Image (tube, rainbow, N blue to C red):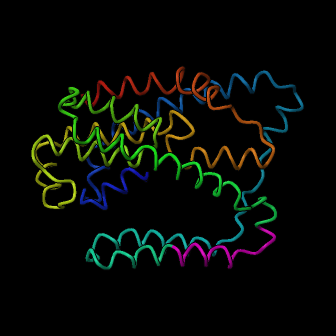
Amino acid sequence: GDPPLFLGYLKGVPFFWVIQELWYKWLIAIVLLLVMFYVLDTRHFRKQSAPEQEFARMRDWVNIDGQINFVFLGFILGAVLLGAYLPEDQVWIREVIMLAAAAGSYFATPKKIHASNNFNFHPIQEVAILFAGIFAAMVPTLDWLAVNASQIGLTSPGGFYWATGITSSMLDNAPSYLNFLAAAMGLEGFSVDDKTHILDWIATHSHMLRSISIAAVFFGAATYIGNGPNFMVKSICDHAGVKTPTFIEYIYKYTLPFLLPVLIITYFLVR
């Protein structure tokens, strides 16, 4: 469901562990955010003129074009599941299937659908360049954190929650998750690169993994660069002429007033 969790799955975290351990925390956060959205949306709706409100009440039939892409999406999901059963020297098969599905989707989708959605590769190019730079700059920092976690006081679930979260919001949540997972396991002499170690560690330290997982996913929404899709959505909107908040506006208009209270509540659920 999110890049950090996918990395954990690739390292050996059981596929259904997340939903079994974190479903109610996820549900609480989603409900809180939906309530906030409903209140704000209702407030903004009431500020609209009568014609605008009438237009908003209009109901059109939902029409989905390009249904063939559901098939390619199925191939991608299948490749993800297949990856868990492939030997280490054959995991490239998963990537080949995903790339083939992406190429098939692009060429099988009628051009008129691409045109109607203003589809182009500019947003993903921008994201690729930005995150290539972020990843190159963050590797030494995260490696240092993984080795020195105990020296800076990271020994508790709460500590890992805030450390993973803050780092995820500023340096992308996927590698942040993996490095703090390595740090937490390293405190007990386990290796993140050994799947048997992963299972043994989870059996006795599931509370630590819960904190790291929740923090990486939830804090990833705190900034545009906390998660790759965040910036891609902004880029798509910008190219389509839709006004979006700046990096700083995103933080003080959305993260601080709405997301931060949810993150604090979540902290008390996982510490």
Q: Is residue 10 left or right of residue 260?
A: left
As drawn, the residue found furthest toward the right would be: 51
Between residue 131 and residue 166, name the one nearer to us: 131
| Residue 236 vertical position relative to residue 145 in the rendered view, above or below | below
How many marks on residues? 0
Instruction: Determine the image quadrant of residue 113.
Output: bottom right
Main structural element of the magenta stretch: helix, strand or loop?
helix
Tell me where residue 220 appears, x and y as whole percent. Answer: 46, 39
Task: Name the residue located 17 percent from the left edge and 55 percent from the top edge.
Answer: 198
Tell me where residue 7 appears, x and y as whole percent. Answer: 35, 56
Q: Quadrant of the C terminus?
A: top left
Tell me where residue 227 appears, x and y as whole percent. Answer: 50, 45
Q: Is residue 197 left or right of residue 27?
A: left
| Residue 244 vertical position relative to residue 175 in the rendered view, above or below | above
Instruction: Determine the image quadrant of residue 193.
Output: bottom left
Task: Name the residue located 84 percent from the left edge and 35 percent from the top edge.
Answer: 54
Instruction: Determine the image quadrant of residue 245.
Output: top right
Task: Name the residue located 89 percent from the left edge and 32 percent from the top edge.
Answer: 51
| Residue 22 vertical position relative to residue 50 in the rendered view, above or below | below
Q: Which residues are magenta?
A: 99-113
Between residue 67 and residue 189, name the one nearer to us: 189
Task: Name the residue located 29 percent from the left edge and 28 percent from the top edge.
Answer: 269
| Residue 141 vertical position relative to residue 197 in the rendered view, above or below | above
Look at the image and say whether residue 209 sits in the magenta stretch: no
